[in-house]
Amino acid sequence: MDQQLKLWLAPPIIMGVAYIYFRLKIPMAWSWGFFLQGFLLIISGACGYLFGPEWLYVALSWTMFCLFLIAPKVLILSCDQYISLLNSRKLFFYSSFFPFIYWGKMGLFWRDLYLANAYALDGDAMKGKGILDKWRHESLPYVVDVQLNATSTGINLILFDWDGVIDEYDQRIAKRLPVSVGLSVQTARAFSEKHNFERAAQCLEASRLAETKTDPTTLAFVLLPFFCLSGQQAYAEQLVAVLKSAKRHTAEFLLLYWQARLQVTLGNPEEARHLFAQSLDSSRRLSVTGQSNYAVWQSRIEHQLEHIDDKFDLPASDVLQNIAARVWRLFADTNFVAAAILPKKAAPAVVVLCASLIVTYVMSGCVDMVASSWAQPFLNLNVDFGNSIVALSEKLGNFTFENLLLDKDAVLKNGQYFRLFTYMFLHGNITHLFLNVVGLYWFGRRAASIFSPRSFVFIFVFTGIIAGLAQILFSDIPAIGASGGVLGVFGADFAGIFRLKNSLPQKVRKAELTSMSVLAGSQLLLDHVIPKVAGEAHMGGLIAGLLIGCLIPLSRKQEPTSKT
C-alpha cells in the first residue's frame, strides 16, 4: 500500500518543477508566490518519500495541486464567461478569490482586472478605469502590461467606445509597444462595428491566434462578430453550429443577439427585431438563476434597436468575400493547431486500448480485491459461495500474473515471447493502472491526431515490446504495466510535433517541446527515486517512440500556417 501511495506523490513533484520553470521569466516581485507554491508542491511530495506517513503527504500534495494549478484556470474561465454574459454580480463575487490562489501582487492584480470590468458593467466605468490606473504607476512585467491594456480596451468595448479601442491599438503600434492577442481581437471587433473590415481582418491576422491553441468553441465566439457584422451568413451559420454543438454551450441569448446583428447587416430589420426579442426573453429566463444580468442586457438591445434602421455602406461583395476568406483561414489554422496539440475527442482506438487495460486489471488482481473487501458483506450471506468466489479469484489472479508478466528466464530460456506483449496489460494496483490509463488517454489522443488511430495502436504495441526487450536485457527484475508503451507514445508525440515545423507556429512548437522535455526529464529522474520501477523499460520505450515517431507518416498535411 505504501508503494502505491508513493506513486501518487510523483505528479505533484513533476508539476511543481514545471510550475517554477515556466515562471522564471517573471520578475521576483511578481512571481515569488508562484515559486513558493511550486516549492511547496515539491517539498510536500519529497517529504512523502522521505518521512511519511505517505497518505498525509498525498492528500496535502494533491490539495495544493488543485488549489495552485487547477483552481486559477477554472476561476479565470468563469470570470471571462461572466464578462461575455455581462453579469457583474457574479464577477464581483468570483474576483474576490484571486488573492487566495495567486499570492502577492499577481493575485491583487487579477482581482482588480475583473473588478474593473464589473464596475464598468454596472455603469460606473470611471471607477473601473480608476482601479486600472493605479497599476500603471507600477513597473509591470510584459505579461502583466499586455493584460492590463487588454482589460482597459475591454472596458471601452463595454462602453461602445470603438474609437477609444482603435486609438489604444494604434498608439501601441506607433510606439512599437507589445500588442496582446486580446487587444488585437478587441480592436478587430471595434473595426467591424465601424464597418472597416479590411482593418479588422488585419488585426485578426496580426493577433497570432494560432499561437494561443484556442479551442474551437472559444474561437468561434471570438470570430462570430466579424462574420455577423460583415454579413457573411454562411460562415456565421457554421460558427453558430459549432457553438451550439459544444459541451460548454454558449448562452442562447448571446447567439440570438448575434444572429439578430447578422440580419441587420443583411437588411432584414423585422427578422432582426424578432431575434432581439427572443434574445431578451432568453436573458430574462436565465436571470432567475443568476446566469444573466437582464437589466444590462436590455439596455444593450435597446441601443441596437435605436440604430436598427441606420444605413451603412459595405465593401463590394467580391472584396468582402476575399476578406472573409482570409479570416476563415485563421479559424482553420487555429483549429489545426488545437486539434494537433489538444484534441478534444479521443479516437475509438484510444478508448478501446484504455478500456482493455481496465478490463484486464479487473480480470486479474482486482477481482481478488473486490471479492475479499468491497463485496465481502454480500458474500457473507452465503459463506460457502463467498469462499468459492474468493478462491476462484485468487487462482485466476495467480494464474494471470504467473503466466503473463514479463520474466527474463521465461522469455529467453523458455521462448515465451508472448510475454513481451501481455505484460503491458497487467498492473499491480489501482494507482499503477490509473496513471498509465491517464497517460495513454492524454498522449494517445495526440498521437492518433498527429499520425492516425492505426499508427497510434502500432506505436503503443511496438514501443511496449521494445520496452520489454530493454527490461529483460538490462535488468533481472520482472515487469508489468503499460508505462513503457505510454512513454513510447509520448516519445512519438514529441517527434511528431518536432516534424510539424511547417504547420505549427514556432512559439507553440517550442513551448510544447520544452514542456515535454521537462516531463520526460522528471520521469527519468523519478525512475531512480521510486523503488521497484522498471526504469530500463521506460527508457527503452521512450527511445523507441522517438525513433518510430520520426519514421511514421504524418496524417496532417504540412501546410504553412498564417504567419505575421
Image (tube, helix red, strand yellow):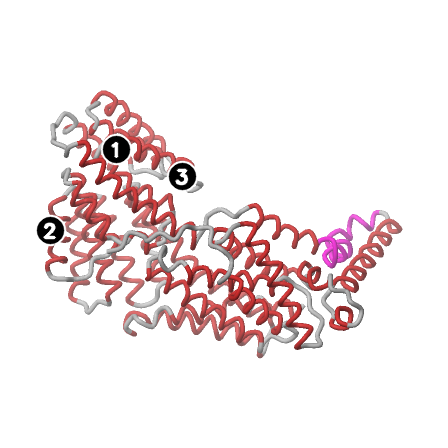
Work out whether 35 lies above or below 335. below
Q: Which mark is residue 29?
A: none
**Mark found first going from the N terminus, 2 or 3:** 2
* Residue 225 % position (x, y): 25, 38
The residue mark sitting in front, 1 or 2, is: 1
Magenta segment, principal secondary structure? helix
> What separation in Å lies between label 1 and label 3 (alpha carbons)?
22 Å
Q: State left or right for residue 376 relative to residue 104.
A: right
> What separation in Å lies between label 1 and label 2 (alpha carbons)?
27 Å
Amino acid type, callout 2:
Asp
The residue mark sitting in front, 1 or 3, is: 1
Q: Residue furthest right?
A: 384
Q: Is 380 a magenta residue?
A: yes
Work out whether 86 lies above or below 521. above
Contact (Cβ within 8 Å) of mark 1 with mark 3: no
Q: Which residues are magenta?
A: 362-381
In the image, 231 versus 18, the foreground residue is 231
| Crowd band around label 2 with a 10 angstrom C-alpha radius: few (<14), some (14–19), many (20+) | few
Residue at 57% in and 72% down: 539
The residue wearing badge 2 is: 167
In the image, 187 versus 29, the foreground residue is 187
Instruction: Identify the image quadrant of the N terminus.
Output: bottom right
Amino acid type, callout 3:
His
* Residue 409 % position (x, y): 77, 73
* Residue 457 % position (x, y): 59, 54
The residue wearing badge 1 is: 232
* Residue 531 % position (x, y): 63, 76
Q: Is 124 a magenta residue?
A: no
Instruction: Identify the image quadrant of the C terminus.
Output: bottom left
Contact (Cβ within 8 Å) of mark 1 with mark 2: no
Amino acid type, callout 1:
Gln
Work out whether 215 lies above or below 48. above
